[in-house]
Image (cartoon, grey):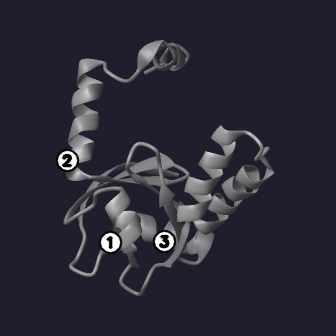
Amino acid sequence: MFRGLNQISLDSKGRLAIPARYRDPITEDAQGALIATVDRDRCLLLYPRPRWEEIERELVRLPSLQPETRALQRMLLGYATDMQMDGHGRVLLPPPLREYAELDHKVIMIGQGNKFELWSEANWAEIERNWAAGIGLGEKGTAALEHISL
């Protein structure tokens, strides 16, 4: 289970050092294999390979005759990239993924249970501002929170 916020720096080659507390679980669960893909919020999603393979199977089974489904499949599957943690716990984020999410030197890594989200520092600051202002939840988001004891 991945949780927490981490501020990380990309090196000049675009490598991201996975925080030490996550390395053992990723190694045990996925032998260090990760998949990165895009999210419509202009961040990246980073999954241990076995978790991604579950999602990939579901995506492939969706009816591709619907334009919305086809667009989702194109983006998530099309950008999906295999990565392997090196001996120092780093992964190389390919340039197209870094460009999509507007990642430069400073990256915010947010644990989301079965995956991580990778955000540019500027885009994450906007998410925080919107959250504080109550923007982006809408009625459905607010209703979902009613079922959770916070």
Q: Residue furthest bottom?
A: 87
Amino acid identity at mark 1 = Leu
**30, above or below 145, in the image:** below
Q: Residue at x 77, y 43 (%)?
A: 65
Q: Which residue is mark 3?
A: 24
For label 1, the SS is strand
Q: Which residue is mark 1?
A: 16
- Number of numbered discs present? 3
Mark 2 surroundings: few (<14), some (14-19) or many (≥20) residues within 10 A:
some
**Is 65 positioned to the left or the right of 15 in the image?**
right
Amino acid identity at mark 3 = Asp
Mark 1 surroundings: few (<14), some (14-19) or many (≥20) residues within 10 A:
some
Q: Residue at x 24, y 24 (%)?
A: 132
Could you tell me residue 150's position as x and y percent? 43, 21
Pointers 1 and 3 in contact (C-beta within 8 Å): no
Circle number at residue 147: none
Front residue (pair 106, 149): 106
Front residue (pair 101, 90): 101
Q: Residue at x 66, y 65 (%)?
A: 50
**126, above or below 78, in the image:** above
Measure the alpha-carbon separation of dots 2 and 3: 30 Å
Amino acid identity at mark 2 = Ala
First of labels 2, 1 by sequence position? 1
Could you tell me residue 51's position as x and y percent? 64, 59
Measure the alpha-carbon separation of dots 2 and 1: 17 Å
Q: Which residue is mark 2?
A: 122
Could you tell me residue 88's position as x and y percent? 35, 83
Quarter residue 54 falls in: bottom right
Mark 3 surroundings: few (<14), some (14-19) or many (≥20) residues within 10 A:
few
